[in-house]
């Protein structure tokens, strides 16, 4: 078993924003496949494709009406087969988004549930309850939706009378499934098999820790739902079942879970008979704060080591304001995972140059830490968040559901700039991109960055190439060399691989620092007079334990030879 996922670099494609192949202004699978050479050159090991299954697109594909088909917006099943085959030809693995918490309200199961009425087996696949109050016209409890507003919506019964309510953690068009119903478990195990049969190497499991709700549905002070995740929660049995499905296939198939839980809870989901890896959102929250970063690194490594699981490192995704913007704000925004909180606007002025410099430095930490690393499309270009999209362009359901108080996540989903040409090469000339692309992104386009050694793209490419060739970067044993109390100014750790050690330095202060002896592998800013400038990071190769061993034995041999000669 290679367990490739332990230290893979996995690139997230947000299909509608990555590349448009058919020129309708919306990214698609053909467009993504056509860019496989770019991804191979970048040096990624695997892809994660955000959902491209049949969907009314209320939550951009996270509301699925047919889990076994591709949405025509993105192409066809044949296009998906082609994408998987092409990626595999390049040696790139493909993981798909798996959305088990809720279906679309257009899914045949939900339609059948509404039509079948109270107490039916069809309703038992979802979370239907009678309302409270006179005539049941108040929601069954006070839980709130992550996207704003109540998390219950009332249906009409088949005879037209006002009826039961159904639960939705997200939008009303995303009814939650009843994961205590074995039919639901069986159906989703079968969906996994469907995609595994077609060559998927694994899955990213959406809202993975929320499948089981407290089915007494108690009111809470905050309106937050009660979602048991501890050891005794039946949610773990679901993942044990999924694991068996994955393990029944050749080729080391894997699953990464999306969860915002505390590290020790996350680790429960990563026990050897459950899932493989989990996004480390604590690292996202840490921003550019040395102590927070160190704590996030230590805590997650320790919690996961206890169950034998590696850690993943992530700074950006389709739900979080882009790091160049977050890191360029005075109070570095700690905001990720819970959608409604995820907008960078309103957090004070942004210094994008500072944000970019910090993002370059943080990239060298991200890409060095032991474990799997995720890169969100456009992160390698240093794209900022677009916080001034016109109101009329906003499409995230958060915007409507919050009564136009939260702008939502569109700012981190603006399409990729590929060239300096029309529509920056994202789409053909006859269509508007689904979100407007800022004109000044011409200089951030792939074509513009390709020719520049000091570009973010060049940094990512070089870092990934070094990582691929190294036994230490991304996979060595982490040993801190900076004291905890200097973390605000300096993070320094060694990564010890079999025959080399790489020292990673993150200078968080404004002042330059001396570099240790060793070979400079890469730095996020030019080294001046042997010093690493402020707000910069470097990778320095050091002689590893085996290197030292080898030199000691050579020394030993020399001494033995001298002694021999004297005899
Ligand atoms: C996850 C997705 C997010 C989506 C939500 C509901 O958090 O990453 O984009 O809106 O789940 O499916």
Image (tube, rainbow, N blue to C red):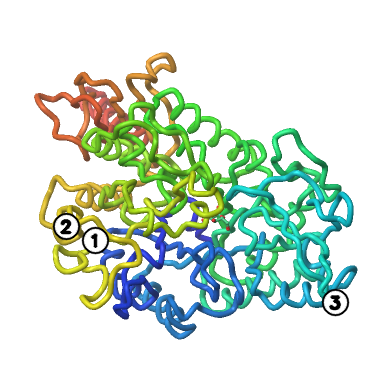
Name the residue rendered at 22%, 52% in the picture: 457
Q: Which residue is mark 1?
A: 417
Query: Which is closer to the viewer, label 1 or label 3?
Result: 3
Q: If the picture is divided into quarters, which one holds ligand 1?
A: bottom right
Q: Earlier in the sequence, mark 2 or mark 3?
A: 3
Q: Earlier in the sequence, mark 1 or mark 3?
A: 3
Name the residue rendered at 27%, 21% in the picture: 509
Quarter the C terminus occupies: top left
Give the secondary structure at mark 2. Answer: helix
Image position, residue 147 (x, y; %): 58, 50
- Is the Cβ of the residue at disc 1 closer than 8 Å to that at disc 3? no
Is residue 216 toward the left or the right of residue 146 in the image?
right
Give the secondary structure at mark 1. Answer: loop
Q: CA distance from mark 2 to mark 3?
A: 58 Å
Image position, residue 460 (x, y; %): 26, 49
Image position, residue 116 (x, y; %): 83, 76
Callout 3 crowding tier (Cα within 10 Å): few <14, some 14–19, many ≥20: few
Position of 26 relative to 142 (above/below): below
Name the residue rendered at 53%, 49% in the picture: 403
Give the secondary structure at mark 3. Answer: loop
Q: Which residue is mark 3?
A: 159
Q: Residue furthest bottom?
A: 78
Q: CA distance from mark 1 to mark 3?
A: 53 Å
Q: Which residue is mark 2?
A: 442
- Is the Cβ of the residue at disc 1 closer than 8 Å to that at disc 2? yes
Decide if residue 510 is in sight here: yes
């Amino acid at each position: 078993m290679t367990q490739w996922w332990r230290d893979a670099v996995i690139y997230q494609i947000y299909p509608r924003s990555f590349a448009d192949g058919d020129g309708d202004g919306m990214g698609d699978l053909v467009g993504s496949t056509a860019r496989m050479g770019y991804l191979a050159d970048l040096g990624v090991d695997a892809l994660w494709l955000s959902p491209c299954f049949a969907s009314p697109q209320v939550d951009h594909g996270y509301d699925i009406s047919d889990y076994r088909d591709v949405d025509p917006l993105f192409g066809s099943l044949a296009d998906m087969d082609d994408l998987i085959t092409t990626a595999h030809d390049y040696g790139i693995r493909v993981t798909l988004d798996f959305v088990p918490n809720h279906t679309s309200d257009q899914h045949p199961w939900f339609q059948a549930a509404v039509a079948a009425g109270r107490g039916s087996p069809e309703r038992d696949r979802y979370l239907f309850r009678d309302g409270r109050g006179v005539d049941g016209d108040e929601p069954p409890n006070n839980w709130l939706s992550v996207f704003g507003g109540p998390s219950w919506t009332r249906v009409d019964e088949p005879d037209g009378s006002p009826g039961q309510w159904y639960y939705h953690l997200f939008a009303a068009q995303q009814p939650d499934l009843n994961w205590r119903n074995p039919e639901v478990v069986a159906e989703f195990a079968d969906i996994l098999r469907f995609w595994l049969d077609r060559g998927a190497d694994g899955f990213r499991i959406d809202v993975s820790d929320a499948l089981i709700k407290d089915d007494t549905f108690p009111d809470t002070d905050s309106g937050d739902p009660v979602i048991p995740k501890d050891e005794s929660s039946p949610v773990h049995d679901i993942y044990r079942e999924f694991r068996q499905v994955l393990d029944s296939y050749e080729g080391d198939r894997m699953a990464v879970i999306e969860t915002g839980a505390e590290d020790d809870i996350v680790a429960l989901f990563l026990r050897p008979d459950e899932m493989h890896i989990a996004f480390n959102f604590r690292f996202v929250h840490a921003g550019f704060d040395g102590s927070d970063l160190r704590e996030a690194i230590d805590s997650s490594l320790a919690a996961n080591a206890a169950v034998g699981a590696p850690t993943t490192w992530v700074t950006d995704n389709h739900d979080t304001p882009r790091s160049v913007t977050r890191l360029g704000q005075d109070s570095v925004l700690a905001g990720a995972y819970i959608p409604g909180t995820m907008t960078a606007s309103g957090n004070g002025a942004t210094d994008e140059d500072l944000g970019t410099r910090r993002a370059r430095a943080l990239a060298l930490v991200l890409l060095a830490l032991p474990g799997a690393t995720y890169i969100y499309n456009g992160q390698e270009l240093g794209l900022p968040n677009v916080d001034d999209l016109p109101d009329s362009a906003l499409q995230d359901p958060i915007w409507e559901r919050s009564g136009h108080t939260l702008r939502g996540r569109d700012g981190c989903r603006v399409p990729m700039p590929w060239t300096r040409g029309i529509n920056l090469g994202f789409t053909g000339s006859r269509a508007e991109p689904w979100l407007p692309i800022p004109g000044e992104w011409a200089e951030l386009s792939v074509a513009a960055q390709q020719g520049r050694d000091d570009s973010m793209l060049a940094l990512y490419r070089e870092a990934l190439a070094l990582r691929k060739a190294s036994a230490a970067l991304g996979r060595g044993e982490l040993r801190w060399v900076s004291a905890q109390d200097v973390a605000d100014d300096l993070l320094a750790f060694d990564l010890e691989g079999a025959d080399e050690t790489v020292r990673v330095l993150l200078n968080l202060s404004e002042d330059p620092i001396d570099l240790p002896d060793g070979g400079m592998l890469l730095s996020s800013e030019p080294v001046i007079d042997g010093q690493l400038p402020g707000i910069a990071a470097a990778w320095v190769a050091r002689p590893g334990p085996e290197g030292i061993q080898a030199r000691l034995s050579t020394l030993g041999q020399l001494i033995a030879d001298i002694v021999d000669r004297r005899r």
